Image: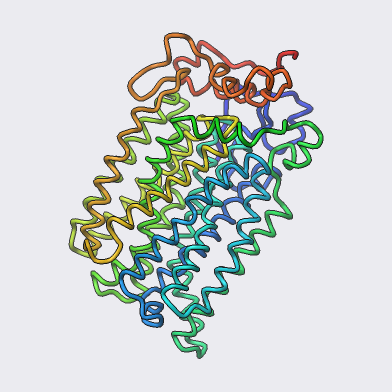
C-alpha cells in the first residue's frame, strides 16, 4: 500500500538522506507498507511487532481460562476481577508513557516498559491462587501502554496526511496479538500436553513462549530503533537540533486541551470495548454454545484478527476524508463508524444462534476497530508540543473504558454475558455523542466551519509557546508542523491556499 502527499517538497540534499520522500520536518510523505527502509518504515515494523507481543502476553490467559480456573479453583468473581486488573494498570501507565515519550523518546520508553513487564509473564507459570492470578494479569497489563509509544513514534515519523494510515496499521497490527493469542496459546498448550505433560502443567509451561517473544522485541527496539527521522532524542538534544522542553509545560498544555479529554472518552468505547471483548469472548462462546475450547478460541480469534485490515482501514479512511473534507471529514467519519459499532454490539447480545452470533461479531469488530484507527487519525493534530500527553490521555481513556465496562457489566453474575454485551452497545452510542463538541478554530467541527476570526494553523500551534520560549527558537518544530497540517482545511479550502514548499523559521 502506498499513500502520497501532493506538493510536499524539501531540499534535494535533505531528501537524499532518506529512502522515502519527506517533508520539512523530515517526516515521510509516503507510507510503503512492505518496505523496511530506515528510519521510517523500520520504526513502523519495530513498533507494531513489539506492541503485538505485549498484546499476546496480556491476553494469553483468557483462551486457557477453562483449564486455569479448574486448576486454581477460580470463581466467576475471581475471573471478573482479574479481567478488570489486566486492563486497569495500563490506565496510568499509558498516561505516564505519553509523558515519557515527550521527554526521552519512544524507543527507550517502550523498550524499558516491555522489559519491566516480561518477568510477570514468566511468573504466571508459578501462580497458585486467585490473588496471584490477579496480580500477574495486573502487572502484565502494564505492557499495553506501549500502544502510546507506538502511536507517538508513528506521528513522529510520518507526515500529516498519511499519519492516520501509519497509526492505523501500527495499532491495528499490534492489536492482532489479541486475536493471535486466542490461537497461539491453545496450540502451544496442546503441543506441550501431547508431549507428555499433564494439562495443569502444560498451561504453565505455555507462558514461557509469550514471555520470550516479548523480551526479544524489546532488544530489537534498542538495537535497531530510532526515535526521530534525524536520530535519537538524546543525541538531538545534545546537538541542539531538538529543544529541551519543560516537563510541567508539556503536561500543562496536554491536560488543558479539552479535545484530548473528549477523545479519551470516545476511545474508551471503541478500544476499551475491544479489550473487554478480548477478555470475555472465548469464555462466552465456550459456555453459551457448549463449544470445545479450541473451537471457542478460533471464533474468539476472528474478532482480534480483523485488526489485520479493520483498524488500518479506519486510519486510511480518516486520511481520505481529511484530504477531501479536512478535519471535519475525519470527525464525521469517526462518529458514524463508532455509532454503527454500538448498533451491532447491541445486536450481538440479542441474537441466539451460533452462526448469526459469529457473523454479527465479525461485522461489529470491523466497525469498532476501524473507529480506533480513525481516532488516531485525529490525535496527532490536537497538540504538537504535547503530542505524547494527548496520546497517553487518549490511550489511557481506552483502558478506563474497559475497566468501567467490565466492572459494570461483566464482574460477577449481576448480568448475563449476552445482556452485558447489549448494554455495552448502548454505552458505545451514548459515549460517542460528545464527538460533536470537538472544534478546531482553524478547521471547524462537525457542525461548524472555521472561526470567522481567520485563525491560522500557526496561531493554534504557536499558542502553546510563550514569548520567552519563542525567543529561544523552541517553537520552530511547531511552526513546521503548522505548515504541513494546512491540508486539514480540506480540498475546497486548501485549493486556494497552497502550502509553501519550504519553511524558514523567522529570525529571532
Q: Position of residue 151 (x, y in %)?
A: 55, 43
The colour scheme applied to this rendered structure is rainbow
The residue at 76%/36% (across/down) is 237
Residue at point 48%, 39% (across, down): 376
Using the image as rendered, state which of residue 21 and residue 388 is in the foreground.
388
Quadrant assignment, res 341: top left
Q: Is residue 27 above or below residue 130?
A: above
Residue plotted at (53% across, 77% down): 125
Q: Is residue 220 above or below residue 310?
A: below
Identity of the residue furthest to the right in this view: 239
Which one is nearer the viewer's eye here, 253 or 124? 253
Residue 248 location (% of width, % of height): 61, 34
Quadrant where the C terminus is found in the figure: top right
370 lies left or right of 343: right
* Residue 491 appears anywhere in the view: no
Residue 446, quarter of picture: top left
Residue 11 appears in the figure: yes
In the rendered image, the residue lying farthest to the front is: 248
Q: Nearer the viewer, residue 289 or 363?
A: 289
Relative image position of residue 68 (x, y in whole percent):
41, 77
Q: Residue at x 61, y 56 (%)?
A: 113
Left/right placement of residue 67 relative to residue 339 reads right
On screen, residue 312 above or below 477: below
Quadrant into which the N terminus falls: top right
Amino acid at each position: 500500500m502506498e499513500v502520497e502527499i501532493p506538493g510536499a517538497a524539501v531540499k534535494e540534499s535533505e531528501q537524499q538522506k532518506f529512502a522515502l520522500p519527506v517533508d520539512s520536518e523530515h517526516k515521510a510523505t509516503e507510507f510503503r507498507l512492505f518496505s523496511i527502509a530506515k528510519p521510517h518504515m523500520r520504526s513502523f515494523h519495530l513498533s507494531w511487532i513489539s506492541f503485538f507481543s505485549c498484546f499476546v502476553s496480556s491476553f494469553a490467559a483468557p483462551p486457557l481460562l477453562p483449564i486455569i480456573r479448574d486448576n486454581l479453583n477460580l470463581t466467576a468473581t475471581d475471573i471478573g476481577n482479574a479481567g478488570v486488573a489486566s486492563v486497569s494498570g495500563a490506565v496510568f501507565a499509558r498516561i505516564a508513557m505519553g509523558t515519557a515519550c515527550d521527554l526521552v523518546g519512544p524507543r527507550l520508553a517502550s523498550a524499558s516498559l516491555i522489559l519491566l513487564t516480561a518477568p510477570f509473564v514468566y511468573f504466571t507459570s508459578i501462580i497458585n491462587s486467585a490473588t496471584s492470578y490477579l496480580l500477574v494479569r495486573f502487572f502484565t497489563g502494564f505492557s499495553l501502554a506501549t500502544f502510546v509509544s507506538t502511536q507517538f513514534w508513528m506521528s513522529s515519523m510520518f507526515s500529516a496526511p498519511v499519519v492516520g494510515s501509519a497509526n492505523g496499521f501500527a495499532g491495528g497490527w499490534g492489536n492482532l496479538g489479541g486475536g493471535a493469542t486466542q490461537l497461539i496459546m491453545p496450540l502451544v498448550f496442546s503441543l506441550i500436553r501431547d508431549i507428555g505433560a499433564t494439562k495443569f502443567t502444560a498451561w504453565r509451561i505455555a507462558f514461557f513462549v509469550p514471555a520470550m517473544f516479548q523480551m526479544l522485541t524489546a532488544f530489537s527496539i534498542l538495537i535497531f530503533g530510532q526515535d526521530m527521522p534525524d536520530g535519537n532524542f538524546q543525541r538531538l538534544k545534545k546537538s541542539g537540533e531538538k529543544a529541551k522542553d519543560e516537563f510541567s509545560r508539556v503536561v500543562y498544555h496536554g491536560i488543558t486541551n479539552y479535545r484530548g479529554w473528549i477523545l479519551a472518552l470516545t476511545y474508551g468505547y471503541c478500544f476499551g470495548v475491544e479489550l473487554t471483548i478480548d477478555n470475555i469472548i472465548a469464555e462466552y462462546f465456550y459456555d453459551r454454545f457448549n463449544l470445545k475450547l479450541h473451537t471457542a478460541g478460533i471464533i474468539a480469534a476472528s474478532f482480534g484478527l480483523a485488526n489485520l485490515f479493520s483498524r488500518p482501514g479506519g486510519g486510511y479512511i480518516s486520511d481520505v476524508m481529511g484530504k477531501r473534507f479536512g478535519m471535519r471529514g475525519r470527525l464525521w467519519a469517526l462518529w458514524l463508524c463508532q455509532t454503527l459499532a454500538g448498533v451491532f454490539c447491541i445486536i450481538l447480545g440479542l441474537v441466539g444462534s451460533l452462526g448469526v452470533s459469529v457473523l454479527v461479531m465479525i461485522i461489529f469488530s470491523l466497525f469498532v476497530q476501524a473507529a480506533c484507527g480513525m481516532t488516531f487519525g485525529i490525535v496527532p493534530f490536537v497538540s504538537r508540543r504535547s503530542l505524547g500527553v494527548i496520546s497517553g490521555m487518549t490511550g489511557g481513556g481506552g483502558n478506563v473504558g474497559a475497566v468501567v465496562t467490565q466492572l459494570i457489566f461483566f464482574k460477577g453474575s449481576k448480568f448475563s454475558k449476552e445482556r452485558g454485551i447489549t448494554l455495552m452497545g448502548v454505552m458505545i452510542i451514548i459515549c460517542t455523542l460528545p464527538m460533536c463538541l470537538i472544534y478546531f478554530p482553524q478547521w471547524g467541527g462537525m457542525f461548524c466551519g472555521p472561526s470567522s476570526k481567520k485563525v491560522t494553523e500557526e496561531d493554534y500551534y504557536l499558542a502553546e509557546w510563550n514569548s520567552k520560549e519563542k525567543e529561544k527558537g523552541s517553537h520552530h518544530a511547531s511552526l513546521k508542523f503548522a505548515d504541513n497540517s494546512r491540508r486539514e482545511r480540506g480540498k475546497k479550502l486548501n485549493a486556494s491556499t497552497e502550502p509553501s514548499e519550504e519553511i524558514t523559521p523567522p529570525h529571532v
